[in-house]
Image: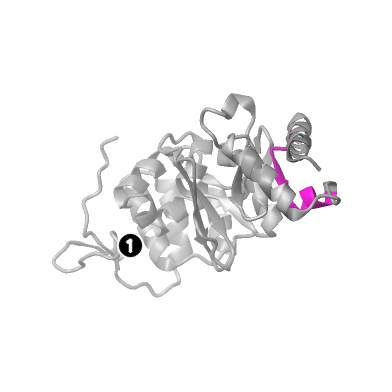
Amino acid sequence: MNEEIIYNYLLKYAEKRLAAGKLYFTLKGLRKEFASYSDSALTFSLNRLSKKGKIVSIHKGFYLIIPPDRMAKGILPPALFVDSLMSYLNRTYYVGLLSASVYYGASHQQAQEYFVFINKPQLREKNKKGLRLNFVVKSNIPQIGIEKKKTEAGYINVSSAELTAIDLVKYQSKIGGINRAVSVISELAEEMNANNLKNLLDNEIISDASLQRLGYILDKLNESDLADAVFDSLANKQLFKVALKSNSNKNGFQFNKKWKIIENIKLDLEF
């Protein structure tokens, strides 16, 4: 069949999915739809659609359809496709860190980087059209502390304000350091609830070191109810000295006895 005809068929297929609110398609689905066409013919037309900016391959066998009003950027916001992508990959996930904080009024997220927590095995980060999709592996994806947030394309899994705060401290190196975590947590605190935090800490395995750092930060932010919830969860545990700034020098600094924190960095509390 003429290559131009196949190309037009695929273009109409993509447009039809867009009209139905579907912002993606899979190679498997495409082959089923156009079973009479050879793989080489489909590949040729897919490459042509890609070069024209009408589709983007975000993962092998998974294509985003770029609506006309987003052609200039050449990519979709991750919130519009991350749930479909994770479903395609059959992976448990949630959106976290700075990408989750925006749902709770924190305005520190950079649109060029999007954080997604997944279960094992690791996925390679995706860099497409100036967008960095950063996958963070967790051995245990929490059963609670994850909320459904509505988007233009459906719903996505997003860490709660409480889980987001915990992750910001634990994965401080991924977001620019402990002071950036403090800055975001200062805004998240308005949306955090002490009972929700306690429930999360009672039901999920979270490292003591992360909780010591979080409790210390909440104390410094004068969020006493939240800090108390963390302190209560650590009350019957044998705690060890922990550096506030991870992977940094621990010698010669003041020591906070309550949280057993080595204060090896000065917190910036001027917001």
- Magenta part of the protein: which range? 21-32
Image quarter of residue 187: top left
Residue 34 shown left or right of residue 65 in the figure: right
Q: Quadrant of residue 247?
A: bottom left
**Badge count:** 1
Tell which of 102 and 219 is nearer to you: 102
Q: Residue at x 76, y 29 (%)?
A: 19
* Res. 214 visible in picture: no
Q: Is residue 258 left or right of residue 75?
A: left
Q: Is residue 208 above or below residue 157?
A: below
Q: Is residue 72 visible?
A: yes
Query: Where does residue 266 sit, x and y in percent of width and height?
Result: 21, 51
User: What's under tag 1, amino acid-wise?
Assistant: Trp
In the rendered image, which residue does mark 1 sit on? 259
Residue at 60%, 24% in the rendered image: 69
- Please state, as top left, top right, bottom left or bottom right, where the N terminus lies in the image: top right
Q: Is residue 5 left or right of residue 147?
A: right
Up the image or down, 127 lies above or below 49; here it is below
Q: How is the rendered protein coloured?
A: one colour
Residue at position x 58%, y 67% in the image? 120
Q: Please identify the quadrant where the C terminus is shown.
A: top left
Looking at this view, name the residue that lies furthest to the bottom. 238
Secondary structure of the residue carrying tag 1 is loop
Q: Is residue 31 above or below residue 54?
A: below
Q: Is residue 27 magenta?
A: yes
Query: Residue 268: within the magenta?
Result: no
Q: Position of residue 145 (x, y in %)?
A: 59, 52
Which residue is the extreme one toward the top? 69
Check disc 1: other Cα within 10 Å, few if <14, some if 14-19, many if 20+.
many
Horizontal and vertical percent position of residue 41: 73, 48
Q: Residue furthest right?
A: 36
Residue at the extreme left? 252
